[in-house]
Amino acid sequence: MSVLTPLFDEHRLILRVTDAFERYLKQLPTESDEVRQDLHRFVTFFREFVDLSHHEKEETVLMPAMVKAGCDWESEDFEHLRKDHNQERYLMRVIRQAASQRGLWTGEDLRHLKSVGQELVDFMRAHVDLENRKIYPVAMELLQGERGAMVTEAFEDFERVRRSHGYDGFLSELAEELVRDYSGESAP
C-alpha cells in the first residue's frame, strides 16, 4: 500500500460524486424543494469533503512533506495546484449562492447554475487527473521509508481529528446517497 492510497481513494470517491453531480445538473429543467435540497447536499459534500478534508490534507500534509523532501514550494506544479484549489473554491461559492438564493430560480438562474456546475465538473476531472499524473507520482517517489511513515502518521492524525468531529460517517453516508440517487450505484 502506498502512502498516497488514502488520497487516491478519495479521488475515486470525488469523481463518483462529481459524476452524480453532472447527472443532477442534466435533470435540472425545473426547481422544487427537493431539487434545491439536493444542491445543498452536493455543496456540503464538495465543501466539507473535497475542500476542508482532501485539499486540506494536500496543502497541510502532502505539499509540506514534499518540500521537506526537496520540492520547490514555488514550482510551477505547486503553483498550479494552489490556483486550482482556489478556482474550485470560487466555483463552489457561486454554486452555494445559487443553492441559498431566496425565491424561485428563473430560467436564467437555472442556465447559469447548469453552466457553472458543468464548469466545476470539468474542472474537478481535470484537477484530479493533474494530481494523479504529475503531483502524486513525484510524491510517491520522494515519500518512501521514514518520510512516508511520517506522512502516513500525519494523514492518520488528520483523519482522527475529523472522526472526532463526526464528519467521517456523515460525509461517507452523504456521498453514498448522492451517488445512489444520481447514478444508480452504491458508493463503497
Image (cartoon, rainbow, N blue to C red):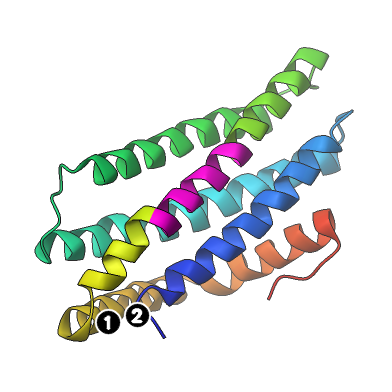
The amino acid at mark 1 is: Glu
| 125 relative to 187 in the view: left or right | left
- Confirm whether residue 100 shows in the render: no
Residue at image position (52%, 32%) is 91
Q: Which residue is label 1 attached to?
A: 153
Categorize mark 1 by other alpha carbons within 10 Å: few (<14), some (14-19), many (20+).
few
Residue 19 falls inside the magenta stretch: no
- Contact (Cβ within 8 Å) of mark 1 with mark 2: yes
Q: Position of residue 10 (x, y in %)?
A: 52, 66
Rendering quarter of residue 150: bottom left
Instruction: Give the SS element for disc 2.
Output: helix
Rendering quarter of residue 67: bottom left
Q: Position of residue 25 (x, y in %)?
A: 77, 37
Residue 124 falls inside the magenta stretch: yes
The amino acid at mark 2 is: Glu
In the image, residue 73 sits, relative to residue 83, either above or below, namely below
Categorize mark 2 by other alpha carbons within 10 Å: few (<14), some (14-19), many (20+).
few
Instruction: Give the SS element for disc 1.
Output: helix
Please tell me which residue lies in front, 144 or 19. Answer: 144
| 15 relative to 61 in the view: left or right | right
Rendering quarter of residue 2: bottom left
Residue at image position (18%, 66%) is 65
What predominant SS class does the magenta segment belong to? Answer: helix
Residue at image position (74%, 57%) is 178
Q: Position of residue 34 (x, y in %)?
A: 84, 43
* Mark number, residue 156: 2
Please tell me which residue lies in front, 126 or 162. Answer: 126
In the image, residue 149 sits, relative to residue 29, either above or below, namely below
Q: Position of residue 31 (x, y in %)?
A: 85, 30
Magenta span: 121-133
